[in-house]
Structures are given as C-alpha cells and as structure tokens.
Image: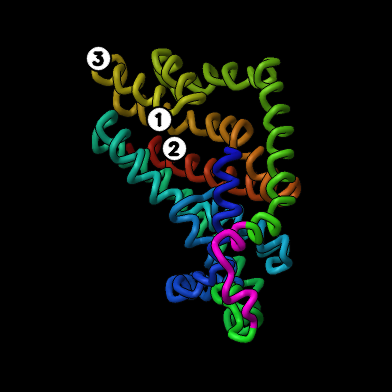
Amino acid sequence: MGSVMFISLFGVELFMQMGLMRHLKPFGKPVARAARLPAETAVCFLAAIGSMIAAHTMAAQFHADGRLNDRELRLTGILNTVPFHLRETLTFQLPVVLPLLGTRLAMIYIAAFWLTGVLKLCYVLICGRAWGNGKAPLETGEDPFSAYECSPDDPECLNRSLTRLLKDAWHARKKMFFNMIGVLAVVTLLVQMLTLSGMLSWVEAGIAPLTSALGLSPAVIGPLTTYIFSPIAGISYMSTLLTQNSISGYEAITALIAGGLLMIPVTRLRRTLPRYIAIYGGRNGSFICLLTMGFGLLSRILVLAWIILFY
C-alpha cells in the first residue's frame, strides 16, 4: 500500500510538473461541468480510471494546495470510486462471478454492484449542481490542466532536466507522503488489534439470525461466513453447494446479497477506512468512507427486497 501511495503521489506530481495535464483537458471538462465542480475533480476522475489510489492521492494533493475545499474534496473522493465499478466488472465480476454462479444469478449480483456506482454518481451530480449555484468552474480560476505549464520567460522551469524534475517532485510532496504513511500505519495497527482481540466477533454471531430471518437453509452459513471475510472464497463455496444441489439458486443469491450487509462494514473497517484516513485526514476520510459504505448497503437492501418480492 505504501509503495502504491508513493508512486501515485510522486508520479502525479512529476506528471503535472512536466506540463502534461493539458492533454487530458478535452476528456475532463465534461465531467467537471456536469457536476459543476472544479476542474481538479475531473483530473482526479480521469486518474481513477487507472488507479483509485492515485486519484485519491491527487485529490488530497489539490486540497493541500488549497485548490479544493472540504466539500469539493468529499464529492471528488466519492466520484473517484465510481470508475472502480466498471473496472471491477471487467476484472472480477465477469471472469470470476459469472462462471461460478451462472448467468442469471451473476447478473443479479452484478446489478447490486452497479447500483452502488449509480447511487454515488447521482449523489455527486445532485450535490455538485445544488452547491455550484449555476457557476461554470472551468471558466474561472487557475486551470489545473495547464497550471504547471512553464513560462517561456522562465528558463529555470523550461529547461529542467529529469533529475531536477524528480528532485522538485520529491521536495514538493515528501512531507505529505510521510504523514500519509504514518497515519496509515497507526490506523491499520489499531484495526488489526480490534480484529485479533475478537471485537469483530459480532459479525459471525449475526449470520445465523440473518439466514433464519430470511428462511434460508443452514447450509449457507458456512459459505456466508467465508464470504464476509473473502468474497472470492465465499462465492466459490456457494458455487459448490449449487452444483451439488444442496441449496437453490434463490437461497444462494439471497445469502450473498444479504451477506454483503455484513461484508461491506467489515471490509471498510479493515481496509478502506485506514487508507482514506491516511490520505484525506480523519474527518474527510471518515465521511467519504461512511458515505460510500452507506451507498453499498443501500444498493444491497434494494436488490434484496427485489429478490424477496419478485424472484
């Protein structure tokens, strides 16, 4: 995680100091205009298509530079998670979930995943336009797509060597990097201590009542427990029971969607929250993590209700 943050932070800084951001402007402007957010948001969104960590790091960098306020930072952080739903569909849902669960069940599972992304995008667009007061942010202020262009009158900037660029990027972001790493180490350690001390045992204790309330076979408890801590292993386990006709398709997809109500808080606490606090700080990082978690839970509640009523 530290190496990814290092590459993201200093790679983006180097990219910007070389004046290459202008090439992304035609792709980023429509995103910023739709949500009436600063162009910095569009830059981060484009970066999120390749790496969500890089996008979050860029947003934190813009915030540290005073180019994003807290409200814009939070909306940008949420928007940065939207491309993940497309990338994860191509790299995990279709190649892994589809063969294991079959077309019908996989489509329902993927629908819950995509609904989360749609809810996030709608939230950003609605809040951005409501708070933007009809302004066109790209037309005012310093444009980040060209902010690091060198002036023809500044030979020091125009003729910098690669070594000089690397040194400038290091001096510009080293303090921020070490702060992030320190916070990440402390928060991750605290979460692991909570896990090992058994304070997360409530998750396992809640599985049996959940399956009982939904009228599911006790056979799903095993794969559901596995799923909460490892989705791939849990889905594989559930696929085995389906193949053996130990459970029905309804029981399998209901258990997986309901299991997400327990799995999402666990993964957010163990992995996402430490990262976001390290990158965005305690208040903004917690807000972004909790809100995105809320959208994930809401989407699964909606899909679970649909399954119970119409499957």
Q: Is residue 129 magenta?
A: no
Q: Which mark is residue 306?
A: none
In-front residue for pair 273/147 = 147
Front residue of 217/73: it is 73
| Sequence-earlier tag: 1 or 2 | 1
Label 3, label 1: how many angstroms apart (C-alpha)? 18 Å
The answer to which image quadrant residue 178 occupies is top right
Judging from the image, what secondary structure is the residue with disc 3 in? loop
Residue assigned mark 3: 244
Image-based side of 21 in relation to 157, left or right: left
Q: Residue at x 47, y 31 (%)?
A: 258
Q: Please report the residue visible at 68 percent of the width from the left and 66 percent of the height from the top.
A: 68
* Count of labels in the image: 3
Task: Give amino acid for label 2.
Answer: Leu
The image position of residue 246, as x and y in percent, is 29, 14
Q: Which residues are magenta?
A: 154-166
Q: Quadrant of residue 236?
A: top left
Residue at the spot of label 2: 304
Coordinates of residue 290 in the picture (x, y in percent)? 64, 44
Q: Which mark is residue 254?
A: 1
Residue at the image point whose x is 39% and y is 13% from the top:
219
Q: Is residue 155 magenta?
A: yes
Q: Are there few (<14), some (14-19), or many (20+) residues within 10 Å of tag 3?
A: few
* Numbered disc 2: secondary structure: helix
Q: Amino acid at mark 1?
A: Thr
Asked if 274 appears above or below 73 in the picture, the reply is above
The main secondary structure of the magenta stretch is helix
Q: Is residue 264 left or right of residue 269?
A: left
